[in-house]
Image (cartoon, grey):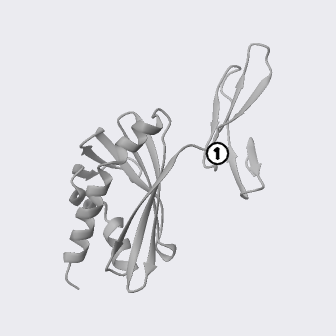
Amino acid sequence: MPSGAVRNDSTNSFNSAVLIGSYSLVQLSYAPYKITISRNNRDKLQKVIMKPVKAVVKSMTVNRNVTEVYNYFENMKNLEVGGQIASLQKSNDNDWWTFDHAIAGKSKMKLVSSIEKYGILDHQFVGGGLTWDVNVRVVPNKEGSTITWLFVKPDGLTDIQFEEQLKNYDSEIEKWRSALESIST
């Protein structure tokens, strides 16, 4: 385990942190929850465990097999079909794609975990001053498939704002469904 790592035995994962200066905030990431460690005026360490936040799941069932759906969404250019993303371009910055988003303006996105065998297409979206970590799964559903997007509310939004931000996603899903079903096999 790396120096400065914290082990979470319940999830069998670890997270590393580095203290910078004597009065720094350190945020541990890649955990099921966020822990912030800071020094207060009396030089004692405080640990704050962030409570879980609201999450919303969106889904689409389509008459296409898992491989077709996975390949469609792995190709980031296909996200433009939804209508909220325009001018999508591959950047030179560690697998990020940049684009104009209808709500968030100038934004970027990258796949953070893509494992075809398990239908995983997790990505991170950064735009409008927010970072969204989105867990995406494509699973078999009889002769078709279902894809789900799990959105966890980013810091900086109320529950109402979070839900409002996701309203347009349903229309994007319908456009993607139509595009997928119109592809001849």
Residue 20: x and y in percent read 65, 27
- Is residue 113 toward the left or the right of residue 85 in the image? right
Residue 80: x and y in percent read 23, 56
> How many numbered discs, if any?
1
For the C terminus, the quadrant is: bottom left
The part of the image, by quadrant, that contains residue 60 is: bottom left
- The residue type indicated by label 1 comes to Tyr
Instruction: Depth check: give the residue in front, 128 or 50.
Output: 50
Residue 103: x and y in percent read 27, 40
Task: Give the residue pinned by disc 1.
Answer: 33
Q: What residue appears at the point 44 percent right and 41 percent down from the top-left corner?
A: 131
Q: Is residue 52 above or below residue 81?
A: above
Residue 55: x and y in percent read 51, 49
Q: Is residue 38 above or below residue 71?
A: above
Circle 1 packing at 10 Å, graded few (<14), some (14-19), many (20+), is few
Q: Residue furthest front?
A: 160
Q: Is residue 76 above or below residue 162?
A: below
The part of the image, by quadrant, that contains residue 111 is: bottom left
Q: What residue appears at the point 19 percent right and 83 percent down from the top-left corner?
A: 184
Instruction: Depth check: give the residue in front, 86 or 167.
Output: 167
Secondary structure of the residue carrying tag 1 is: loop
The part of the image, by quadrant, that contains residue 38 is: top right
Instruction: Depth check: give the residue in front, 124 or 142.
Output: 142
